[in-house]
Image: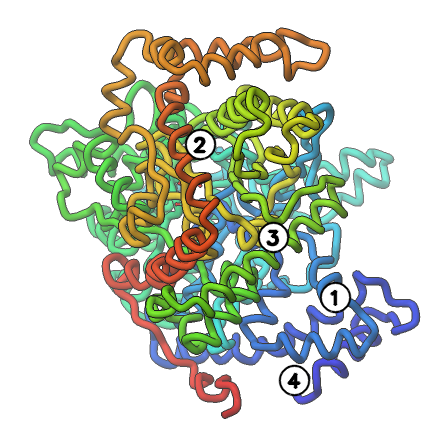
Amino acid sequence: MTDVDLRTSILRHLTYSLGSDADHATQHDWRIALSLAVRDRLIENWHAASRATRAVGAKRVYYLSMEFLIGRLLEDAIVNLRLEDEAQQALTGLGLDPVAVIQDEPDAALGNGGLGRLAACFMESLSTLGVPAFGYGIRYEHGLFRQSFEEGRQIETAEDWLTQYHAWEFERRDVRFKMCFGGEVVEEGGKPVWHGQEAVMAQAYDTPVIGWRGRWANTLRLWSAQPLHGFDLDRFNRGEYAAAAEPEALARTISRVLYPDDTTEQGKELRLKQEYFFTAASLRDILRRFEAEGGALTDLPKRAAIQLNDTHPAIAGPELVRLLHDEREMPLDQAIATARGCLSYTNHTLMPEALERWSEDLMTSLLPRHMQLIERIDAAHAAEQPSRSVSLTGDGEVRMGELAFVMAHKVNGVSALHTDLMKKTVFAELHRLHPDRIVNETNGVTPRRWLLSANPRLSGLITRTIGEGWVDDLEQLERLEPSLTDPAFLDAYAAAKRANKADLADWLAAEHGVQVDPDAMFDVQIKRIHEYKRQHLNILEAIALWRDIKANPQGNWVPRVKIFAGKAAPGYFFAKEIIRLINDVAAVINSDPETNRYLKVIFLPNYNVSLAERLIPASDLSEQISTAGKEASGTGNMKFALNGAPTIGTLDGANVEIRDRVGARNFFLFGMTADEVEARRAVPEHAAQAIAADPRLSGALMEISRGTFSRRDRHRYRGVVANLSGADYFLVCSDFTAYWDAQRRADAAFADADAWRRMAACNTARSGWFSSDRTIRGYMADIWDVVAVRSGLDEAMQPPG
Ligand code: GL2
């Protein structure tokens, strides 16, 4: 299939795979035909990669994650296979608009935010580096909900990406495992045996993940829950139609929806079932592969590095012990040591509500054998510590963070600050007991998607200036340094940004009916809506600025467009209030003829990966304004810096490292440090003090209180104002004045166009360290002990010449 040109292949697929023809094909048909044609080009590389792995008996990485926020796959594959020109020619030759065809693909939104997107970037980097790896997760029928607004309020509807033909996956009918829940543990022949009560099938679906230049491809294996037995014809024939369909419906529930909040309180039992379902199926698959290849079980850690992405797959510890000890008769101590040799755990947040705890009752009823093993693991761990200060259970709960820590040989944080805080706070005692276990691996992002593909104008300029080597060696961006004083380069840099902004302005007008001036500063905050991320600090500043402009409309204001996007968890009331407030403020400010030359506020609905790809290259200023100590790392911050949008931000998460690298002069720093935050919280009436000290802040709050943004309902934001002027746990008021000042420094800097473009270009040139390739190399050396494998395709895939 790869011996023909892309155009022929598209037409063949249109005819023979889709049963359509060029005269009647819809955009969807063309997109699927193109996807299948592109897919054909990567299958052989994919197979070659697994053959090469088997041939050398290489150690594999297994990345277990509840979330893979992969977004669109077609463009990624085209870019990584270097098919851009051929695809462009083929599609235009067929009378199609390449952009429209590619954008017809729905986002695969199998994740909530940063944690899931990180997993997707890691999969791409693992393939680019040629590291044998599997990603394991759940094939959710409904990804993250779709967001729209009704009178400014968030409305959620089900997302249905799988209702369209999904061209990238292969169902593996031979890879199915029976997963059990509930039941009891009984002694049989002196051994505990778990007899589950309920069972479902885990069915594997594989998606190839192709690396840069197609040199290597790994597999994302997602599990779908299916009923154990087929359709109950007996019941159906008796006329019990609903009952006949029931087992199927029940089984499918497990892979039906992605929880829209990774700190969810809802559906606890279903969530735990999902976690066990995909973790246990993955471990079964890992052991099956290991046993097929041969070797002593105690050698498992030499062949399998299993990474737990947060605590969601933390049940892997007891499950692997169960598979080794109960089912393969390895002595318990050895089983624990072997499991620990394979497992490692990434912590992604210090927020107490996100560190999972399951009630012992629930654990006992759903996974009775695991509860026993958790107690055995706890006892074995307690025997190692004289003080017995750490326990895996307590207050009737199982502590999954502690369990993951104890069962892992390495535990990592996701930025230097976060890792440091982890050692001092949540895992202080465990760190004292195991001082070598915690390591830091600062997050990164894949430059193929987030620069090369999302920002063709800028990446073209970079390639013309320093060659193409940066694409898989991002630190080569340093070689732009001499160009930072070259006016011709800076002109071209500024022109690329201006053109991206003009494109965005056109799109905003066409899709959302809002007019913006591409020469205004595009000030962008896009991420999940959460109090700690402080979108309300940003909107308060907008209100204060609007009032200042109104008071002095002839002033020398720097025009700004404030763009927000992000979803709030459906059950998170306050976050949804923030969304509504921003929308309400936008409606008032945007229709104010006195000010709207200078200030616009836009909240774009349904934030997802493809919207991020559209916005980031067109941004001037990146809002990273979380309360210090709360954002573990952030990865959006890196994408903005790389695309030449300086940060306005606090010393939180990876912001600290971004500022160190791009230079303090190219970063608008404000706000309290993590230590100062703790101290400030202890000050009685801290919010009231801050409000009294800053008339702009008190004015903005007064404007909300008096109903300016409340349409007919004056008291709409009473709760928001009460929160901010009362407890204000996230210290919005205490950081407001510093934030305002930093924004005015940003205005002044933006007004000096020459200085600004140098600052933007500096951000690009100095962000090379934030590639996920660098992060993965860190995991390989510090955690996994794996090496890359060559597939033999390296030369074959080099471009001619
Ligand atoms: C997060 C953190 O909040 C975020 O700061 C970090 O960049 C990502 C990836 O490490 O992980 N933790 C978390 O639970 N979610 C995140 O996005 N959802």
Please tell me which of labels 1 and 2 falls first in the chain.
1
Residue named by callout 2:
533
> Identity of the amino acid at label 1?
Ile
Residue named by callout 4:
2
Which residue is at 23% across, 20% downward? 679
Q: Which mark is residue 32?
A: 1
Q: Secondary structure at mark 4?
A: loop
> Identity of the amino acid at label 4?
Thr
Disc 4: CA contacts within 10 A as few (<14), some (14-19) or many (>=20): some
Which residue is at 81% across, 69% downward? 18
Marks 3 and 4, how far apart in space?
38 Å
Which mark's residue is nearer the viewer, 1 or 3? Answer: 3
Which mark's residue is nearer the viewer, 3 or 4? Answer: 3
Which mark's residue is nearer the viewer, 3 or 2? Answer: 3
Marks 1 and 2, how far apart in space?
38 Å
Please state the horizontal and vertical placement of residue 14, each as a whole percent of the image: 81, 73
Please state the horizontal and vertical placement of residue 101, each as a whole percent of the image: 74, 64
| Residue extending farthest bottom | 801
Which residue is at 33% across, 66% downward? 481
Residue named by callout 3:
501
> Identity of the amino acid at label 3?
Lys
Query: Is residue 8 rendered to the left or right of residue 697?
Result: right
